[in-house]
Image (tube, rainbow, N blue to C red):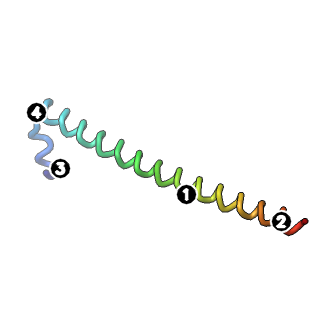
Amino acid sequence: MNFIESFDMDDEEKEKLLEKLASQQLRADYRKALGSEHKRRYMDMEIEKIFKKGKKDER
């Protein structure tokens, strides 16, 4: 569908299109959030490993 065709849509078709786009955006945001959470947890674990290693070296 191109820009000009979008003017020929009735309100119901526009509403369905908006719902579809909103759903796609929600899924994309959710996947992005999951990826960010995974990276954060990974970095937390790596930092914890560094601190544990540092404490062992101090002994």
Q: Nearer the viewer, mark 2 or mark 1?
A: 2
Residue at figure coordinates x 13%, y 41% from the top left: 7
* Closer-to-camera residue (12/9): 12
Q: Is residue 48 above or below residue 12?
A: below
Q: Amino acid at mark 4?
A: Asp
Instruction: State the image coordinates of residue 36 (x, y, percent, origin top left).
Output: 52, 53
Q: Nearer the viewer, mark 2 or mark 3?
A: 2
Mark 4 packing: few (<14 Cα in 10 Å), some, or many (20+)? few
- Whichever of labels 3 and 4 marks the residue nearer the N terminus, that label is 3
Q: Which residue is mark 2?
A: 56
- Quadrant of the rendered image containing residue 57: bottom right
Q: Do tag 3 and tag 4 residues touch (Cβ < 8 Å)?
A: no
- Whichever of labels 2 and 3 marks the residue nearer the N terminus, that label is 3
Q: Nearer the viewer, mark 3 or mark 1?
A: 1
Q: Which residue is mark 4?
A: 10
Q: Is residue 12 above or below residue 7?
A: above
- Whichever of labels 2 and 4 marks the residue nearer the N terminus, that label is 4
Instruction: State the image coordinates of residue 25 (x, y, percent, origin top left).
Output: 34, 45
Give how far apart the Cα atoms at labels 3 and 1 are: 39 Å
